[in-house]
Structures are given as structure tokens and as C-alpha cells.
Image: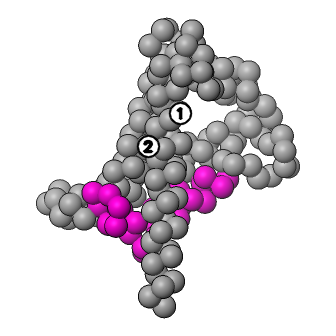
Amino acid sequence: MYMQYISDVYFWTAARLVMGFIFLWAFFDKLFGLGFATTSAQAWINGGSPTQGFLKMGVTGPFSGFFHQLSGSIIVDCLFMVGLLMIGTTLILGVALKISSFAGAVLVFLMWVALLVPKNNPIFDEHIVYLIIFLGLGSSTIRSEDYFGLGKWWKSLKIVRDNSFLE
């Protein structure tokens, strides 16, 4: 039983850190144009829109008209970038895991909806896998943030103790 608990801790800690890195990497790539998903010329700091490429050219399916209208909006760009930064940072640090897991789940669900029907499978793609991981992180009794992160310190703060949704 104890060994199972230890393996669960390692699993959820690794899942939390990997998801945090994925979101932080996406933020920095879109901000600076590191040449992976975003070229330097398309970087946000160079006047590019971090959402325009995906929302204008990548979106398919029944909701494409709605998502195309969001393309290039400064408000959508700011919300998306703040979301990537905050979700990635809180996951890496192990703080506000309930909020960041919920926000991450909402973000990847919206991305999945924007891509209906996924190209490689009629129902599931990596966004659904990410969604499941986010839901697991937000509801896990393992508390991976306590083992490799600032979770114990974060939860000791009075404001967090008084408002459990901030855990």
C-alpha cells in the first residue's frame, strides 16, 4: 500500500511538472518566437498575435466561425498568454493547483472544441489527454505539490487556509 502511494506521488508530480513545462514553453515560444511553433517574426514582442495562426488557420469544424472571429483580438491574445503563463507557473511551483487545473482544463477543452473533428481520431486527441490530467491534478488526493513544490508553504498562508479553492 505504501509503495503504491509513493508511485502515485511520483506519477502526479511528474504529470504536474510536465504539464507546467508544456504551458510555460508555449508561453515563451509565443512571446519570443523561439522557432518551434512560432517564428521570431511572429513573436508577440515583435507585434505578432499568439492566437491568430491557430484561430484563423488551424480551427476546423462546426465552431470555426466563432473561433475565426476571435482571431487577432488583443483581449483574446492577452487572456491566452496570461493563461499560459499562470497555468505553467503555478503547476511548476505547486501553488493554486485547484485554480490552475481548472483553468488548464477549460483552455484545452476550448482548443479541442476548436478542432472538432480531430484529424487523427474522430473523438480524442492530445487535448483530451491534457484535460484528463488537469482534472486528475485538481482532484487528486495525492497532493503532488506538497512533495516537489511550494504546496505546503502555499497552503499554510492564512488567505489560502480561509479559502480552500485557492489550494
Residue at the location (74% across, 21% down)? 57
- Along the viewing direction, whichever of 107 and 24 lies nearer the viewer: 24
Left or right of 151, for residue 34: right
Residue at the location (60% across, 16% down)? 39
Residue at the location (25% across, 65% down)? 152
Q: Which residues are magenta?
A: 128-151
Within the magenta stretch, is there residue 133?
Answer: yes
Residue 46 appearing in the image: yes
Which residue matches tag 1? 26
Within the magenta stretch, is there residue 81?
Answer: no
Which residue matches tag 2? 88
**Cα separation between marks 1 and 2:** 9 Å
Identify which amino acid the numbered label 2 is placed on.
Gly
- The reply to whether discs 1 and 2 touch (Cβ–Cβ < 8 Å) is yes
Left or right of 15, for residue 123: right
Residue 70 x/y as whole percent: 60, 23
Furthest toward the left, the residue is 158
Q: Is most of the magenta stretch helix, strand or loop? A: helix
Identify which amino acid the numbered label 1 is placed on.
Ala
Answer above or below: position of 68 versus 110: above
